[in-house]
Amino acid sequence: MKVIAVDDNQANCKLLSLYVNRWGYTPEVYSKSKEAYRAIREEDEPVLILMDWMMPEMSGLEIVKRIRKERPDFPIYIIMLTAKSNKEDIIEGLDSGANDYITKPFDSQELKSRIKAGIRILKLEQKLLNREEELQEVNNRLKHSLQIIEQDVQAGRKIQFKLLPENDKVYRKYKFTHSIKPSLFLSGDFLNYFKIDRDNVGFYFLDVAGHGASSSFVTVLINSFINQYLDKYRFENDRTILSPSDLFDEINKMVLEEKLEKHLTLFYGIINLTQETLFYSNAGQVPYPILASKEEGESKFLETKNLPLGLMEESEHTEKKVNIYSGDTLYLLSDGILEILEEDSLEGKSDKLLSLIDYDTDMNSLQNKINLDEYDDLPDDITLLRVKRLEE
């Protein structure tokens, strides 16, 4: 990373250049303040500045003030170097936009440590800047996607599906497989899975009420919203993404505040890869997820009785935890599957699903059992997610 040193004393410039180069950074020195000011204005990469205070033409303090005014968001870390040492001078320098302050004569090791600290901050700012640019690019693509959907429903459906995660993705011992059989409408179903940190993988299964463009737009919005909390955890240590109930509260509030006039069901789970546990909450998702145990040889619903999101301001969402053993399989199914089962009652359809799924049922087998390929025109999307703990 580049370090710019500004000092009207040529000897000091040479000394600073020598130190900076020795410490592994790229030095660029200026003895004339106006030249330094123009160079900093034109800099297009994050840069650390060693700025002398007292200089002819323009003082270091004046340069700092102008740069901060002209480039308020650009990552520049400024360390003031000056013989001024009283409290008022230090306050003035920092209030003017300097990040740090070292009095002359300075200790070289102290300066080295201050530069290292500044470089660490600049690298973090660069990461955040890059992430903001990536997010902006994603937002631009989404806006473009929405325009295409308005022009062509079929094109919109294809774009929405491109947002889906990689199929047959494996996180350590867990394999995620999904399948979506679309109806004639744009999908109100969506799912995703992602690495949260070294020990946790998150996944969700979403169903927005209704069909068509409006419901599909909400799935894109919810997906982006959850991704924001994933970023907040990584960059700001906001732990909402690790709490299903807290995440549900934020989504519920956003849906109501934006007046989307939509409600949605959502299952969100977190698999701890070290403890081999599933921590989850379910906001009205039906049918309930099915956990098929290899050890016990049976399948059961993970039942919870919580309301969908977007209906009312105050709603409670219980959190539950279950162990996931070697060979166990978790299945999540959208409510569209209930419409193609022949049984008359919900109880009968639920019993049928349990009979179709065991720990060894793969995605193709389940689709064959319900004759999914025989349906050309489905009344609703049928979305399936299978999470398998691979046998050791």
Image: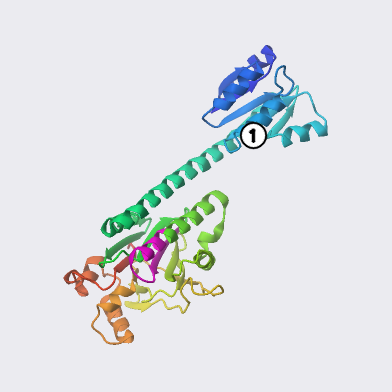
Q: Position of residue 39 (x, y in %)?
A: 57, 22
Residue 323: quarter of image: bottom left
Instruction: Return the x and y of residue 315 as percentages of the image width and height.
Output: 54, 75
Residue, far top: 10
In front of the other: 194 or 47: 47
Disc 1 marks which amino acid?
Lys
Above or below — where is 292 with respect to 343? Answer: above
The picture quadrant where one finds residue 372 is bottom left
Q: Position of residue 186 (x, y in %)?
A: 31, 64
| Residue found 56% across the figure and 40% down from its top | 125
Q: Magenta segment: does it hold 18?
A: no
Callout 1 secondary element: helix
Q: Is residue 316 above or below residue 102?
A: below
Depicted 119 relative to depicted 7: above or below: below
- Which part of the image, by quadrant, shows the C terminus? bottom left
Q: Which residue is mark 1?
A: 69
| 23 sits left or right of 107 in the view | left
Q: How far from the left and from the top, in percent, is residue 193?
A: 39, 59
Quarter of the image for residue 106 reads top right
Q: Residue at x 33, y 62 (%)?
A: 390
Name, please, the residue furthest toward the left: 374
Q: How is the image coloured?
A: rainbow
Q: Residue at x 68, y 34 (%)?
A: 97
Q: Is residue 61 left or right of residue 134?
A: right
Residue numbers of the magenta segment: 200-220
Residue 314 appearing in the image: yes
In the image: residue 308, left or right of residue 18: left
Q: Can residue 110 be seen by looking at this rendering? A: no
